[in-house]
Amino acid sequence: MFAAVMIAALAARGAAAQQPGAAAGAPPAPPASAALKIGIIGTGHIGGALASLWVAAGHEVLMSSRHPEELQALAHSLGPRAHVGTPREAAQFGEVVLISVPYGATPQVGKDLKSELAGKVVLDTGNPYPERDGQMAVEARRKGTGVASAEFLPGVRLVRAFNAINSGDLRSEAHRKGQPIAIPLAGDDAEALKVAEALVRDAGFAPVVVGPLAKAREFDVGTTVYTRLMTEPQLRAALGLK
Ligand SMILES: NC(=O)c1ccc[n+]([C@@H]2O[C@H](COP(=O)([O-])OP(=O)(O)OC[C@H]3O[C@@H](n4cnc5c(N)ncnc54)[C@H](OP(=O)(O)O)[C@@H]3O)[C@@H](O)[C@H]2O)c1
C-alpha cells in the first residue's frame, strides 16, 4: 500500500534538514505514506480512534497515558503493532507524534518533552475551551490555534489536524462509501504537511491543506466548517480554496 510514494519521498528525505521549519540537527521527516512509527500523546476519544485507524492501515503505534496500564486492553485488542507507554516514550518512539490532550495541557507537554519532540512531525488536534482550559484558551482563540500551538510546541514540525471533526464521526465516517469526508490541515512545513496528508488518507479521510499555521484559525472551533462533515469539494468551496 505504501510503496508507490515511498521512493519519491525517500528521495526528498535528504532535503528535509533544509526545510525552514526544521530545527538544526533535527531528524528528517519520515517518508509520506511509508509504514510509520507513530507516538500518541493523549489516547482519549480522538487519540484512541486514530490509533485504531492507523494500526489498521499498517502503522506501528505507541499509545501513551500517564497511567499506561489502563491502555493495555486497547493495545491487546489492536494487535502486535500497538504498544503502550508513557507520554515521554511516545515522543521518543514516534517518527510522527500526535498530540491530542486537553488544550490546557499543551504548554506542559511542549515544555516537558521539548528535546524528545525536537524536529519531529507533530499533529495537533487540540481545541481551546475557556471553560475547560482557562484563560490561555481565550488567548489561543484570539490568536488562532495554529499560531498559539506553535508557541507552545517550539522546535517541532507542526501540523494542525483532526481538530475539526468529532470523535464519533472520526470512527463512523472513516473509509465511508462514496466521497470521503475532508480533514482540514494547516502547517508551515511542506514535508510535514505531506506526511499529515498521507496519514489523513490512511485514516480513511480526504486531506485538504488550508494553508500555513496562521490559516488554522479558518477551521477553529466556531467557524462555519468546524465539525460539519464536508467532502473535499464542499470544504474547498466553503474556504474559498482552489
Ligand atoms: N472529542 C472530540 O470530539 C474532539 C474533536 C476535535 C478535537 N478535540 C480536541 O482534541 C483534544 C483531545 O480530545 P479528546 O476528546 O480525545 O480528549 P480526552 O478523551 O479527554 O483525552 C485526552 C487525553 O489526554 C491525556 N492527558 C490529559 N492531560 C494530560 C497531560 N497533562 N499530559 C499528558 N496527557 C494528558 C489523558 O490521558 P491520561 O489521563 O490517560 O494520561 C486523556 O486520555 C482536546 O484538545 C479536544 O478539545 C476533541
Image (spheres, rainbow, N blue to C red):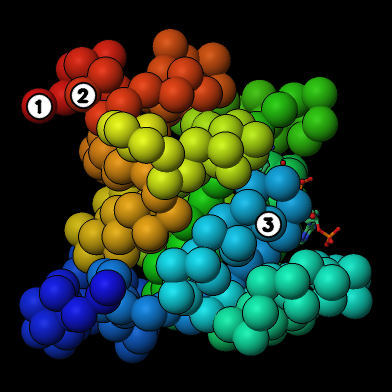
Look at the numbered disc 2 and say if its residue's Cβ is closer than 8 Å to ligand 1. no
Callout 1 crowding tier (Cα within 10 Å): few <14, some 14–19, many ≥20 = few
Nearer-the-camera pick, 8 or 189: 8
Depth check, front residue: 50 or 188: 50
How many angstroms separate mark 3 from mark 2 (CA)? Answer: 28 Å
Residue under the point 38% across and 59% down: 202
Q: Which residue is mark 3?
A: 48
CA separation in Å, label 3 and label 1: 33 Å
Rendering coords of residue 206 (x, y %): 31, 42
Relative to 105, residue 233 above or below: above
Q: Which mark is residue 233?
A: 2
Q: Residue at x 25, y 41 (%)?
A: 209
Q: Tell me which label, 3 or 1, sits earlier in the chain.
A: 3
User: Residue drawn at (20%, 16%), measured in percent from left and top?
Assistant: 237
Q: Residues within 10 Å of mark 2 (few under 14, many from 20)?
A: some
Task: Check disc 2 and give the amino acid type.
Answer: Pro
Q: Amino acid at mark 3?
A: Gly
Front label number (1 vs 2): 2
| Residue 93 in which image quadrant | bottom right
Relative image position of residue 119 (x, y in whole percent): 40, 75
Asked whether mark 3 and ligand 1 are closer than 8 Å, the reply comes as yes
The answer to whether any part of residue 113 appears in the image is no
Residue 102 % position (x, y): 73, 44
